[in-house]
Image: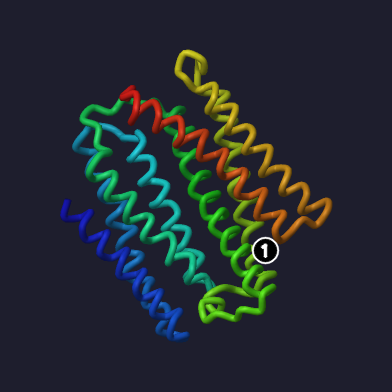
Amino acid sequence: MTIVLIAVVLYLTATGLLVSAVRQDRGRSARLWLAPANLAVLLHGAAHFLAWRSAGGADLHFFAALSLVGLGMSVLTAIVGASGRMAALGVLVFPLSALMLVGYQLYGHVQHPEPLDWRLQLHAWMALLAYATLAVAALFALMLWVQEGALRRREFHGWLRALPPLVELESLLFRTIAVGFVLLTATLLTGVLFVENLLAQHLMHKTVLSVLSWLAFGGLLLGRWRYGWRGVVAVRWTLAAMALLILAFFGSKFVLEVILKRV
């Protein structure tokens, strides 16, 4: 519990430093958020590791998986934020990660997690990486949408300085989607190869929704390459595809594990 509390405080500290840097338009001192953010990420990961060691296996149930996606998003945010002007991403991601970690601490621990062989573990970890990457892409899409709207209305708010230029943000969005699409492809392939009896395991609806999300992300990338899709079109496709992915994984896990108690 102490590790979780410290991690939450560090996440919120990093968020506060980011907000302060954006509001005051500071230069070099704007990177002060990196230290508490990196420490929070390390402690976040340590909380899961210690819980798994105590339980005798990796726990990948609803709240644990949600927390791990938050951890992945924070890692990506720290990497992207350290290399460019993406302070606004951390303002959104770090509080979310802190909330997910608290949820895991309060509700997510399973006493005796079901053991998974290396093939199913590979599939699960690929899925979590894909979800984290594409969730960051969805946040980029929201930022792009808000930024475009503000510029169209000629509302030059101070927070716009925390974002890269519109073209750069759009390029970052599509690069992130491309990486997430590759990870999602690997997730689906490992699922087909390693997961047996989808109907008996209540996984058919998850598979169908995941494939639909994969098709949507793939269609967006194809539209970008073939027709130059951008702006609002890209935002809509990204958010629709991400909504399908959330329903596929966390929607089904919430119903089965939280509501129906089928752990």
Q: Residue 89: x, y in percent?
A: 48, 65
Q: Residue at x 43, y 51 (%)?
A: 72
The residue that appears at 62% across and 51% down in the rendered structure is 177
Above/below status of 115 relative to 81: above
| Amino acid, disc 1 | Ser
Q: Dot 1, crowdedness within 10 Å: few (<14), some or many (≥20)?
A: few
For the image, the number of numbered tags is: 1
Relative horizontal placement of residue 20, taking residue 249 as reference (left or right)? left
Residue 62 falls left or right of residue 126: left
Residue 241 screen position, x and y as percent: 62, 43
Left or right: 106, with 207 as reference point: left
| Residue 71 on image: x %, y % | 38, 52
x 36%, y 36%: residue = 62
Instruction: Give the camera-side residue of 153 and 35.
Output: 153
> In the image, 253: left or right of 57?
right
Which residue is disc 1 drawn over? 171
Task: Identify whether 257 is placed above or below 137.
Answer: above
Assign a secondary structure to mark 1.
Answer: helix
For the C terminus, the quadrant is: top left
